[in-house]
Amino acid sequence: MARRSNRQIEHLLRRAGFGARPDELDFYGDLSIPDAVDTLVNFDQINTDIDSLIGQPGYVGYTTNGTFSPRTVIADARQRWLFRMVHSDRPLQEKMTLFWHNHFATGYTKLAGALGSAEGARYLAAKASEDPGGVRGQIEMLRDNALGNFRDILTNIARDTAMLFWLDGVTNTKTKPQENFGREIMELFTMGVGHYTEPDVYAAARVFSGWNVQRTGAGDALHYEFIYNAGQHETTAKTFSFPIYADGNPTIPARAAAGGMQDSLDLINALAGNPNTARYLATKLYRFFVSEFGAPDPSFVNAIASVYLQSGYDMKVVMREVLLSPQFWDPNNYFARYSWPVEFVVRALKDVGWTGFSVATALTPLSNMGQTLYEPPDVSGWRLGKAWFSTSAMLSRMNFAAQLATNQKFNIAARAKAAAAGQSPDTLLTFFQRELVTAPFDPGVVAELSTYLRSTGAWTGSDAQLQAKGSGLVHLLSGSSEYQFV
Amino acid sequence: MKVTRRQFVKFTGGGIGAFTMTFAAPEFLSDLARAQGAHVRNLVVLYLSGGNDSLSMLIPYNDPFYYSRRPTLAVPAGQVLQVGTDSSRVALGLHPRLTGLRQIFDQGRLALIQRTGYLNQSRSHFTGNDIWSTADPNNAAGLGWVGRYLDSLPSPVDALAGWNTTASMPHVLQSAQTAVPAIASPANYAFQSPNSGTEATAERTSVVRIASHVPIDRPELAFVYGSTQGALATLNKVATVATYNGSLAGAANYPANNGFAQALKAVAGAMVRGIGTRVFYVTTGGFDTHSGQNVVQTNGAYYNLMATLNDGLLAFYNDLRNQALLDDTLVLSFSEFGRRISENGSSGTDHGAASVMMAMGGRVNGGLYGTAPNLNTDPKNPTLENAAGDVTFETDFRSVYARVADNWLGTDSVSLLGGNFKKPVLTFV
């Protein structure tokens, strides 16, 4: 099946999703832009049980040792997420979950070191419906709240078992405040560096003292869950350099230990509503959804920051605004982002094909490209933009393109044949340039691609030639510099 | 930050030129030249990621406050590896696992520069790393200081003038004109194709030709073209490094399960093969020891950090000595900050300020530089800051960089660092 070209819908789905399968192009191509955006942001109205499709024929495959168990095996969790990115009919949900994963970047290795590998996977990737103890892993929480209220997301993150181990909240006590989470919630999760002081860090650590985990349940259901441990809460007043309450008061009052959990809720409320948080998030959204070229557009940042505040931190309202903004639809911003490795890999699968391909094959290449899901390098997330494009990472992208083209060689030839694209080198080139949309090629590059198709012998259009030249061309296109932009 | 590859592209004459250049003989020293006593000067930048608790690495073991402020983390005086006293007569010892570094210290080839940092030191990992990388506390978003050095070299700069042993680009290597390749594993650095034989050759030819069509008016795309060109230009030389296994026998060789040591093996291989690289970047992480730091216990968290560091550097040192490359090499370490003096409630340490830098190599004047902090909790203690919570800096880290720039790299530190940070007492190189 040839793809139904639609420049605007393709742009929308590269950003609000991971590119477009042919069936997605068909579905969204029938909608107006506002309707397409509404469909994307109101994904909760699309009934889907995406995970039930894993292992079914016609979908991308997986590879595992024994039973596929994303709840306890991190490699399986990675495959499940990649499967969802390829096949989910709620692309924006997966895209926002990835955005939040980078924002609240929590790494598996530290959890596995503290808790063991199965538990490390569990507190990141378990679904409550599949876990005997009802554990919902951090990424599942973010997925459930992908377009939820940002204050709720912050509250959930502060109570999240993986986060409590990742940023050492489990060791934060009354007598020995532990600063790690208190610092990062201000520096990386909300206001950004420069908007808090060192004394604020100490105060935040005291605010969160007593937020901890407890072991509960028995047998397979045994698990950690959040507990507010009043006995470990530091009860004196905490003063910040920024307002905590609506009247501008910067001091969280001294409270009895039993009611001290409110300290953190007050701080979270203040951070969610701080104008610097609004601008910090708006800037990050600009970089992820609109453009990484040049400085963020101030009018976008102002507009989105004010929608964020006026909506009471409702990310669905915010994202609808982002996807309908004039900056999003400015043609100069098409292909104005450096794709993340998972964006590149999933889009290549959607463009080139997945039948007979196992997502397990993509795990090592993704690591070589610099992005392993559930394993950001540190709490500040991945280094984005140009930092993805070291020479070795670029070579890894080119080599993944080669691996996928090798795997899909027969499918590629069959597609070209079905579309009668094998008549000449130029019909083949036109066909695959439409199947694998890239940032515009300079004419010299197109000429080189044509030269490549004419090399090594006369054109016959035979099956063997379509396999060789088709896979070679798909390799060249998906491994091109132009294809690395979304 | 504005980075373009235009000049890089211009200098190398585009992808085809760059590609064919890889078959030319290295312009740097041959084995024969080395045998005749000629030297080059390689710089290995070592980043200890996470904020190294240098008080657990270089220990003022006679300071009573060291023990009172670190009840579970202090190394008993009897276990430290004594390295003498500094100019303020503070007795110092290395962490007990640093037996190899002690050997190097005893040979006079390891310098420990105490209390390095800067005014109002950032306690943020990211801002801190940016500042140490740019050598500019006022513009931490600028180019890296090593990247700027590479930019200052006479053009054309070889595509392998720098070698980053990690998968992503560290800030310290970010440059305006010089694309430093990231080669985490020389063995995996190869070009793949869905076809074989003449078809595969035709494809590779096409990739090289396409890479020569750099879009001059699209800087972001041109940057990615630069990465592609860099990868293609370096494939063949890197292949020669992949076969290097080190000169040491058995357990003395680079430990297989130590990624840091394996990265140093690639660095040594690049030097031994003479592929022309002058600046290398290596890193070892896990230093953000907020909890369960376990400094003393065998296989404790910090103990293992020291094991990784020690075993990698010792193998590298001995290998380079065997290869007669020790005099050509300077290793310089940094970390984004030291850690708080008092341990926290989680038997760990939080983000602090000044720390210790290391310089190692055949031409290093080893020893103890600067003075140790006095750990007395008196808020007026001049060696501390933040109400005696953190170590305050005595030597601006840029003075260390300046010494390396002037006396090792042979460049002008004032222009490289944008100011005069020379400090004559820093005679470590």
Image (cartoon, rainbow, N blue to C red):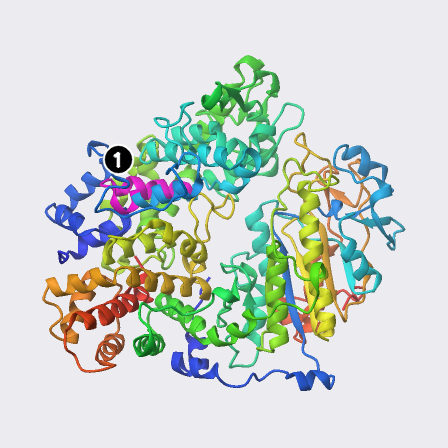
Horizontally, is B195 left or right of A204 in the view? left
Place of residue A435 in the rendered image (x, y in percent of width and height, measured from the top left): 19, 61
Q: Secondary structure at mark 1?
A: helix
Residue A8 percent coordinates (x, y): 18, 54
Q: Nearer the viewer, residue A454 or B126?
A: A454
Q: Residue furthest right?
A: B89
Q: Is residue B323 a member of the stretch shown in magenta? A: no
Comparing A421 with A248, the one in front is A421
| Whether residue A191 can be seen here | no
Q: Quadrant of residue A450?
A: bottom left
One can see residue A215 in this view: yes
Name the residue at the front extreme.
Answer: A66
Q: Which residues are magenta?
A: A84-101
Most common SS among magenta residues: helix
The vertical placement of B38 against B300, above or below, is below
Which residue, given by chain and number where applicable, does mark 1 sit on? A52
Amino acid of disc 1: Ser
Circle 1 chain: A
Mark 1 crowdedness (10 Å alpha carbons): few <14, some 14-19, many ≥20:
few
Q: Nearer the viewer, residue B406 or B9?
A: B9
Residue A91 magenta-drawn? yes
At x 61%, y 46%, the residue is B286
Q: Is residue B268 above or below residue B67?
A: below
Above or below, B268 against A352 in this view is below
Residue B72: give x, y in percent of width and height: 75, 33
